[in-house]
Image (cartoon, rainbow, N blue to C red):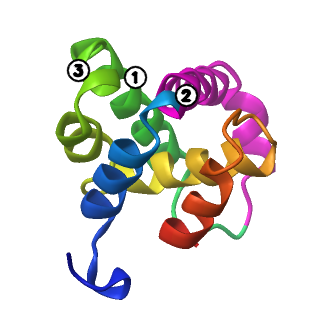
Amino acid sequence: MQPLQLLNNVQKARLLHSLLINEIPGFLGYLNELAETVLNDKERLKADWKDQLFSVDFWFGLAEEVQRVMAKYPKELYKSSAVFADQLFDGYTAIFTAHALTQYVANSRNTDPKFKPAVDLLFN
C-alpha cells in the first residue's frame, strides 16, 4: 500500500468502503438526502451562495450527477468498493461526495464509532 499522502480520492474511498462497509448504506442514504435537498432548495441556495470557489449551478450539477450515479448503480455502490470509489470519488463529483462524507460524520449520522476517525484521517 502507498503512503497515505500519495493516495488519491478514489483510492481513499475504496479503502474506506473496504474497511467499514457496514457504514456505507447509511452514508449513501445521507448522500442521496443531501443531493435531494440541494436540488429541491435551489432558490434559497442561489440567494445564499456568496464568495464560493465555484458557482451554485456547478454545485447543482454535481448533485444531479450524484443522483444519476446512485440511480444507475443502486446495489453496486453498496457492495463494491471499486464502483463506490470510481463513481462517487472520481473527478469533480468527488467535491460533492467528499463534502457529504465530512458532513455525515460532523453531524454524527454514522453508527460505527470508527467511521469518523477514518474519514478524518483519509479526507481531512
The quarter of the rendered structure image containing the N terminus is: bottom left
Residue underneath mark 1:
67
Image coordinates of residue 109 in percent, x first then y, are 75, 34
Q: Nearer the viewer, residue 28 or 67?
A: 28
Residue underneath mark 2:
35
Label 2: which secondary element: helix
Residue underneath mark 3:
76
Count of numbered circles on the image: 3
Separation (CA) of disc 3 from disc 2: 19 Å
Q: Determine which of the numbered discs, if any, sits on residue 3 in the image.
A: none
Single out the mark in the foreground, 3 or 1. 3
Residue 52 inside the magenta-drawn segment: no
Q: Is residue 69 visible?
A: no
Range covered by the magenta-colored residues: 23-50
The residue located at (81%, 43%) in the rendering is: 107
N-terminal label among 2 and 1: 2
